[in-house]
Image: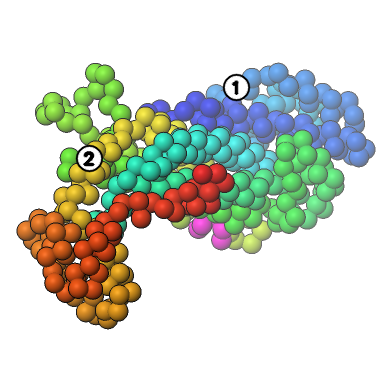
């Protein structure tokens, strides 16, 4: 990814130098296991570790690959330049390139997942803080973009918290699923290498042996991993869209923090634009863009082909680097977000009392009015509020049929705002385990 949307810790996982270091560790641990089994001399295995502090020359490996047209052979040739040809002659014994490539990729994905899980903790912490801060800050709920019934800003944040908490569980599962390694040799039969070598290497790298790998680790695991990243990205966009709506001039119930010296427009100095959440919407699209290719990688020819390889070289860094950046940006947006409770109440009262229509409807049915007649009685008054901006309660109090059914006190009682917040504690208990 371009540096603008990348953070150093995640980017480092995908640097060529990191990849070659992992390749080296796979080969060195495999040699140790081979020596323990008596397949290769102990001194040859120990000689490989002479390169443990070597900074592998990426340019030199690329130079060799320009001739060999094979990246793993180029690396092994470079390794022999450090270890010595005679000492390195048992390196990669009984292994195939996919053993190195696939095991390395899964190490990188696991490391990336660990960073992303930490990122999600930041988002969850920010959402929880704002949820409790605005637990009872009343705002109008909207369905189809239209005023519905009262809710609270705290419930909005709590809803996003619950969604992200589910995503964290999904990512933990995806991390577990992709944390496998394969050192099984050509077509995955272990004909030329003992399965105990695989067990040793995987243990050293924090992986589990792949139960059956053919010549590659099955790509349904990776499809699942990238699919989860796509779901997380969609949840980021879900939150970003809500914030962008809140920052609209006509709404202005919340807004991104606008720092000192920040400019909103090159042409209009008055502008304060939701640029961060707009950016998050775009980044979510980039992460989701990697999901379909990952799914298509599942179908490989026979025991192996490399149609997946070029795809993964791109989507591995792109998806994880972009999502890492997006999660950190989202955490910052939520943490610094400005909330305007007065505007929330003002918006709710643009059509005075209208959000209480269902409560009046239910009261009428409980008073013995048929649902059809009750709906008609409420709607005829509600439409006047829409069309003439009159007060819904006053219209009901002036409607003889409604007064006859509910009485004036019964009508007034239906406009108590606390009616809509009485179960907020219950919802918070369900989401956070505390209220």
Q: Earlier in the sequence, mark 1 or mark 2?
A: 1
The label nearer to you, 1 versus 2, is 2
Residue 237 at least partly seen: no
From this view, report whether residue 183 is shown above or below residue 125. below
Q: Position of residue 392 (x, y in %)?
A: 16, 59
Q: Which residue is mark 1?
A: 57
Residue 82 at least partly seen: yes
- Which residue is depicted at the point 81% across and 44% down? 199
Q: Which residue is mark 2?
A: 343
Query: In the displayed structure, does residue 296 sit left or right of residue 21?
Result: left
From this view, report whether residue 174 is shown above or below residue 7. below
322 in the magenta segment: no
Quarter holding residue 388: bottom left
Of the 4 image quadrants, the one containing the N terminus is top left
Question: Could you say which is closer to the camera, residue 383 or residue 124?
Answer: 383
Query: In the displayed structure, does residue 158 sit left or right of residue 189?
Result: left
In magenta, the rendered stretch is: 295-299
297 in the magenta segment: yes
Q: Position of residue 87 (x, y in %)?
A: 81, 26
- Which residue is depicted at the point 20% across and 46% down? 347
Q: Position of residue 283 (x, y in %)?
A: 37, 41
């Amino acid at each position: 990814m371009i540096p603008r949307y990348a953070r150093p810790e995640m980017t480092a996982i995908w640097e060529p130098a990191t990849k070659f270091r992992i390749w080296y560790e796979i080969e060195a641990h495999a040699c140790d296991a081979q020596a323990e089994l008596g397949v290769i001399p102990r001194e040859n295995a120990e000689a490989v570790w002479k390169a443990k502090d070597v900074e592998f020359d990426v340019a030199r490996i690329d130079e060799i690959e320009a001739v060999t047209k094979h990246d793993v052979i180029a690396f092994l040739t470079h390794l022999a330049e450090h270890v010595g040809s005679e000492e390195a002659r048992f390196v990669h014994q009984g292994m195939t390139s996919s053993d190195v490539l696939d095991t390395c990729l899964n190490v990188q994905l696991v490391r990336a997942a660990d960073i992303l899980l930490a990122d999600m903790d930041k988002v969850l912490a920010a959402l929880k803080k704002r949820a409790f801060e605005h637990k009872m800050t009343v705002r109008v709920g909207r369905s189809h973009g239209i005023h519905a019934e009262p809710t609270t800003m705290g419930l909005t944040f709590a809803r996003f918290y619950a969604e992200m908490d589910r995503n964290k569980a999904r990512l933990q599962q995806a991390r577990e699923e992709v944390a496998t390694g394969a050192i099984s040799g050509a077509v995955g039969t272990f004909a030329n290498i003992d399965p105990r070598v695989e067990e040793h290497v995987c243990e050293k790298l924090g992986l589990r042996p792949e139960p059956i790998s053919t010549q590659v680790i099955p790509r349904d695991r990776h499809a699942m991993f990238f699919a989860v990243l796509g779901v997380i990205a969609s949840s980021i966009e879900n939150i970003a869209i809500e914030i962008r709506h809140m920052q609209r001039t006509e709404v202005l119930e919340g807004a991104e923090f606008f720092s000192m010296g920040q400019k909103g427009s090159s042409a209009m100095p008055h502008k304060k634009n939701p640029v961060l959440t707009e950016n998050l919407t775009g980044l979510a699209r980039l992460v989701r863009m990697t999901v379909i290719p990952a799914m298509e990688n599942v179908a490989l020819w026979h025991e192996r082909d490399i149609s997946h390889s070029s795809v993964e070289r791109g989507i591995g860094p792109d998806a994880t680097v972009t999502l890492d950046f997006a999660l950190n940006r989202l955490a910052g947006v939520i943490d610094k977000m400005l909330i305007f409770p007065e505007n929330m109440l003002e918006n709710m009262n643009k059509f005075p009392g209208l959000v209480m229509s269902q409560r009046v409807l239910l009261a009428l049915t409980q008073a013995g009015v048929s649902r059809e007649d009750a709906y008609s009685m409420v709607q005829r008054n509600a439409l006047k509020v829409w069309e003439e901006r009159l007060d819904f309660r006053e219209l009901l109090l002036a409607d003889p049929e409604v007064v006859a059914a509910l009485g004036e006190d019964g009508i007034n009682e239906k406009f108590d705002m606390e009616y809509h917040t009485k179960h907020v504690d219950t919802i918070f208990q369900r989401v956070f385990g505390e209220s």
